[in-house]
Amino acid sequence: MHELSIIGLFQFVTPVLCGHTYHGRFASPLSTACSQLSILLPTYLVKYPSTGQLMLPSEILYEITAKVVTEYIDETITEPYPPPKDQNDVLALLQVSHQIREVTMKVICDAFQFKRNLDGSLPSNPFRLLDEIRVAYRRALHLRVYTPSRSLTAFIAWCKDTFTPFSPTGSDRSSILNAYENLAFCEGFCQHTLAQPDWDNISLINDPASWTVFALAIQSPPGRWALFETVSVRSRCSMVFWAMVTSLRLSAQDLEEEFDNYHEASHIDNDGVELLEQSLEHLASVGPRCRAILVEIAPDASFDVTVEMFEYATGVLDILEDVVCKATKFGLANLQERANQLLSLWDPSRSYDSE
């Protein structure tokens, strides 16, 4: 098959699927949806002997269409700014051809667990449901504002009030919406827990390996990985993010407590210096330590410390600044230099001049 541009390829394929010729350029958002589909088309186009036409097997078209639909769902629910209403890739797919329309409807029904009405329509508007679950998801990300009280019981009650309405008509509990409900619960639970005065005494937070609360968001119903891959990967990355945030806070807290032992001291002996250096390296190794625990569960996740983590790993950078000052006071040049290296790496604006 001759090499074709992405849009050109789909312009070639679409008339075959639709049974007519398309003239001119695809307009957005149709071109976006077509572009995503056309990336994988050359491999799977087959010629049917009975007609001599090039066609896509429905199972291949299903996988490609599922990727477009689930990415749209994910962006609509989770991104700070959802796709504009006039750039709806799912609606665009429904306009491409009869075959792609029916496959897209199949994907929507499988994702939302809809049963189509006798006239072929859907029992609920999936776009309205996405808008509603988006509101709940965004609220879950700001529970420091929305949580009515500090108790875990109140948080769980809030979740029940927030998420129970999102089992849509004609749907069961294996809807893709429920996967995002579970993810929102995990995100909200972590934020809520870390905001508590006794956050470091909660066993779930102390041991990232025991974060089974993420299991419901990560798991994919049997035979439906194509639909749940995006939310599953996002949930795994979220689990890693919160594990690292928690590890940063715990490690920084341990370092601070170690230094507090010398609050009134004028000198730190070699054993004390060694313990301080070990505590600092424990903080520096958060990424590798979390990777060792979670990489098999979340192979797609990044284990790098990011600026966003310090929005929730509150106090960590302040503690490092304090370590630099105290190390200077006690003449611990190696400790001072190492703490300053971490500051430079994690927030260059806070690092101290080597002089």
Image: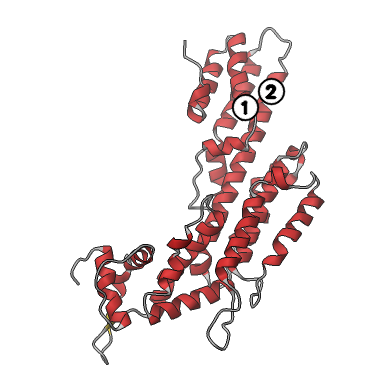
Q: Position of residue 272 (x, y in %)?
A: 66, 18
Q: Is residue 24 above or below residue 306?
A: below
Q: Amino acid at mark 2?
A: Glu
Which residue is painted at 81% across and 46% down in the image? 151
| Residue 223 shows in the view | no
Which residue is painted at 53% across and 39% down in the image? 287
Identify the residue under disc 2.
258
Q: Position of residue 189 (x, y in %)?
A: 70, 49
Between residue 93 and residue 181, name the one nearer to us. Answer: 93
Q: Is residue 184 above or below residue 57?
A: above
Q: Secondary structure at mark 2?
A: helix
Left or right of 139 on screen, residue 71: left
Q: Amino acid at mark 1?
A: Ser
Q: Position of residue 45 (x, y in %)?
A: 29, 76
| Residue 118 shows in the view | yes
CB within 8 Å, label 1 to label 2: yes
Left or right of 127 on screen, residue 45: left
Q: Secondary structure at mark 1?
A: helix
Identify the residue under disc 1.
279
